[in-house]
Every structure is written in structure tokens, then in C-alpha cells.
Image (cartoon, grey):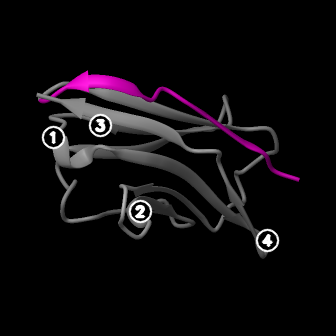
Amino acid sequence: QVQLVESGGGLVQAGGSLRLSCAASGNIFRANILAWYRQAPGTQRELVAAMVSGGNSNYADSVKGRFTISRDYAKNTVYLQMNSLKSEDTAVYYCFASQLGYTYWGQGTQVTVSA
């Protein structure tokens, strides 16, 4: 069974960068999809970035060109590199994985972007 443990959230100034990490206790190399979601107060949880089984990545228009999802097979970890952060990026970020018909969520990590 896969357990996702997130880290890397915090407070950052606008224009700065953060890298979120999502370490899986179980092997996620067979995952159909690896993704990052986020949810700001009063909003629905939205898909930010996803890596599908074929290795291609998709991004929300709001983060395209600024965020990058990546994977380290040796460390069994998924990353979200966030550059040129804006106040609109403030949200709780969640790691997500789907594998063999099962879905898994991380606990969420707060990202706050200040002026």
C-alpha cells in the first residue's frame, strides 16, 4: 500500500521559488498518474500538474511555464518545482497518485506567497 509524505511547503516572497517533495513509502513506478493539486480557501481543489503513465506532463494554464513536475525513480519521490511564485499560488498543495485502480493522497502542505 502506498503512503505519500509531503514536504517543502512554507512562506515565500512573490517572485521566489519553492520545491515540494512527495515521498512514497511504496513503489509508485507503476502509477497511472502522478499529480499535484491545490486548494485555496473557498475554492474547489484544482489540478496543478500531472505526469501520466507515458511520461508526459500537463499543467494548469495558471502555472504553465512556472511550475514543473518531475520524478526521481531512485528516491521514489515526486517533485513540484515552483518558480516565479505569485500571491495567487497561495494554497494547500496535495500530492496524488493513482496506481492499479487505487488512489492515494498526501496530507497536504501549505504554500503561502507574500508580497
Give the CA distance from mark 4 to mark 3. Answer: 29 Å
Q: Is residue 51 left or right of residue 82?
A: right
Q: Determine crowd level at label 3: few under 14, some 14-19, many 20+ residues with C-alpha closer than 10 A.
A: many
Q: Determine crowd level at label 2: few under 14, some 14-19, many 20+ residues with C-alpha closer than 10 A.
A: few
Which of discs 3 and 1 lies nearer the camera? The answer is 1
The picture places residue 57, in percent across and down from the top left corner, at: 38, 60
Give the CA distance from mark 4 to mark 2. Answer: 19 Å
The residue that disc 4 covers is 100
The residue that disc 3 covers is 82
Amino acid type assigned to the residue bearing label 4 in the image: Leu
Give the CA distance from mark 1 to mark 2. Answer: 25 Å
The residue that disc 1 covers is 86
The residue that disc 2 covers is 56
The picture places residue 65, in percent across and down from the top left corner, at: 17, 49
Which of discs 4 and 3 lies nearer the camera? The answer is 3
Q: Does 19 sit above or below residue 79?
A: above
Where disc 2 sits, the SS reads loop
Magenta region: which residues? 1-14
Where disc 3 sits, the SS reads strand
Res 60 → quadrant: bottom left
